[in-house]
Amino acid sequence: MTARRTAGRRRLTAVGVLGLALTLALTTATVVGQRAATGVAVRLPTIACPTSFGIDGMGPPRPIVPTTTMVVVPRSTAGALALYVQSAGHARPGLRVLGPRGWLCSGIVYADGGANLRIFPATERRAGEGYAALKLGVTLGTDEACQGCIEFAACPYFRAACNLDPVGPPTGLIPGESTYVLTRTAVAFEIPPSPSRGPYPDNGVVLFARWTTIIQGHRRPTDGDYSAACILPPRAHAECTAILNAVVARYDRF
């Protein structure tokens, strides 16, 4: 996520958005919407990411994963990507996201059930493992009971997500940010480079939905979100598209 949303959330950093320069944003969003028609099933290396937990005993420090996993991606990007997986917390499966092959990764599961997975090169290791804002990397995050976190992630893109937190609504879109609606529960966005954010565009998707659950006989609204970011050089446009396609295909199932 961007620094602006990170500050509001106070704990979930670098869960960003899908970017390519403004001229590529609509192209990327369109491709994300066409994910099922453009991929082939290939085996990708699967990386077990070290994971920390907000409560001791929530899960193992590393997930048990196979050496390879069958994943649907464009054939042209298969050789550049790997699948990164973090440990699960409670009974929920661990997050998994595609990223550049050979990079490092770090996961965290918070006490409230939220989670964050970050993929980054060795040059970003201090920021990646310290959960500071990344200037190069891939991230995926979700929130559970933290209503304020969901609001800061989703409110700029979904009206229904606003005012979940009694402290007050978050700020809107970042200046220069562009958005594209993919589905009723998925929005793609792109933030251009800047001196403070780094030399590469911040590309990503935000997923949000609200449904009704019955708790002790009472109907109560339940909110859920996922945020993914791909911050790579423009030459890696195809890889970013494949990464974000996979996020939407796996997690846009509210």
Image: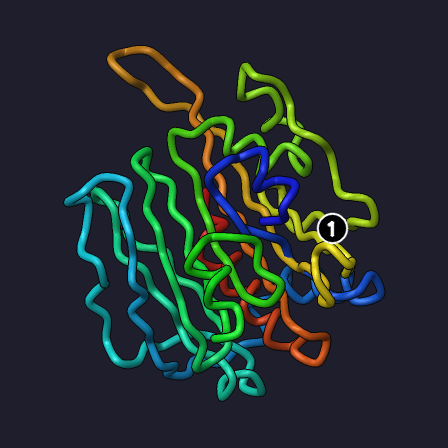
Q: Give x and y (percent) for residue 84.
A: 38, 68
Task: From the image, tell me which residue sits under label 1.
Answer: 180
**Is label 1 in a helix, a strand or a loop?**
strand
Q: Is residue 253 above or below residue 23?
A: above
Identified at 27% across, 11% down, the residue is 217
Which one is in front, 9 or 158?
9
Residue at image position (44%, 44%) is 142
Q: In this view, does 38 lie to the left or right of 200?
A: left
Image: 92 above or below 160: below
Q: Tag count in the figure? A: 1
Estimate how packed mark 1 is, as few (under 14), some (14 to 19) or many (20 or more) residues with alpha carbons within 10 Å: some
Q: Position of residue 190 (x, y in %)?
A: 73, 55
Residue at the outermost left position:
57
Residue at the (83%, 49%) spot, across then down = 176
Compare residues 136 and 77 and report the one nearer the observer: 136
> Which residue shows up at 19% across the image and 67% down it?
64
